[in-house]
Image: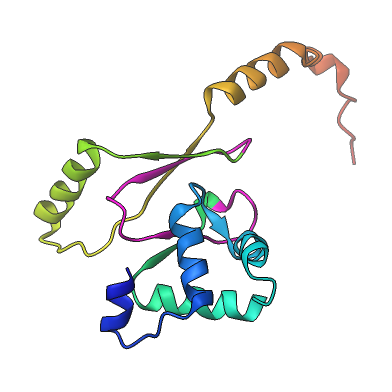
Amino acid sequence: MKDSLKKQGVRLTRQRQILLELIDNSGKHLDAESLFQLAQQRDPKLNRVTVYRTLKLLKEGGLVDELDLMHHSGDQHYYETRLKQEHAHVICLRCGRVEEFFGEPLQKLRRQVESHFGFQIMIARTEIGGYCAHCQALRAQEMKERPEPAPHSDSALPPPRRR
């Protein structure tokens, strides 16, 4: 990644290096605020403006992808390095857990789209929303505990008004 920045004429300052390392090595999808908090632990002089400017620079340089992850946490955006192998994000719509799926089915889909549309794919982002096993179990339990609605009966409705 450092070489990619240098080729684009971007100086890799110590603060930019910290941010890039955090994004690449955190093992999580970080939003700008989380990235700022982690970066401040390593360099208390680093400020939010530097974080946002660096994220913009890294996005424009094609080194970082900005993700919305099904907007599970509102309008927050998350960041990951683009140099990873193409993958899908599988997001639990209840707890927000994010898993990454790598595999041949994604490559097959890519080839099918390219072939069917005569399209040259430069970047693909795949997000799948649903419920993880834990949240499925919680939802099933909640459904069992929910009181049954009263049976619908036309006799419970008031008679129609006449004019």
Q: Predominant secondary structure in magenta?
A: loop
Q: In percent of the image, x 43 and y 57: which residue is there? A: 24
Q: In percent of the image, x 35 and y 77: which residue is there? A: 61
Q: Is residue 75 visible?
A: no
User: Between residues 156 and 124, which one lies in front from this camera angle?
Assistant: 124
**124, above or below 105, in the image:** below
Find residue 146 and report its horizontal and vertical position in percent. 77, 16
Find residue 27 and report its horizontal and vertical position in percent. 48, 47
Residue 89 lies in the magenta stretch: yes
Q: The N terminus is located in which quarter?
A: bottom left
> What is the image's colouring?
rainbow
Q: Magenta residues?
A: 71-95
Residue 5 lies in the magenta stretch: no
Q: Is residue 43 visible?
A: yes
Find residue 145 and report its horizontal and vertical position in percent. 77, 13
**134, above or below 9, in the image:** above
Q: Is residue 20 left or right of residue 139?
A: left
Q: In percent of the image, x 14 and y 47: which residue is there? A: 112
The mark total stands at 0
Q: In percent of the image, x 57 and y 53: which residue is there? A: 71
In terms of image quadrants, where is residue 31?
Answer: bottom right
The residue most toward the bottom is 9
User: Between residues 56 and 118, which one lies in front from this camera angle?
Assistant: 56
Q: The C terminus is located in which quarter?
A: top right
**143, above or below 9, in the image:** above
Q: Is residue 82 left or right of residue 43?
A: left
User: Between residues 114 and 35, which one lies in front from this camera angle?
Assistant: 35
In terms of image quadrants, where is residue 161?
Answer: top right
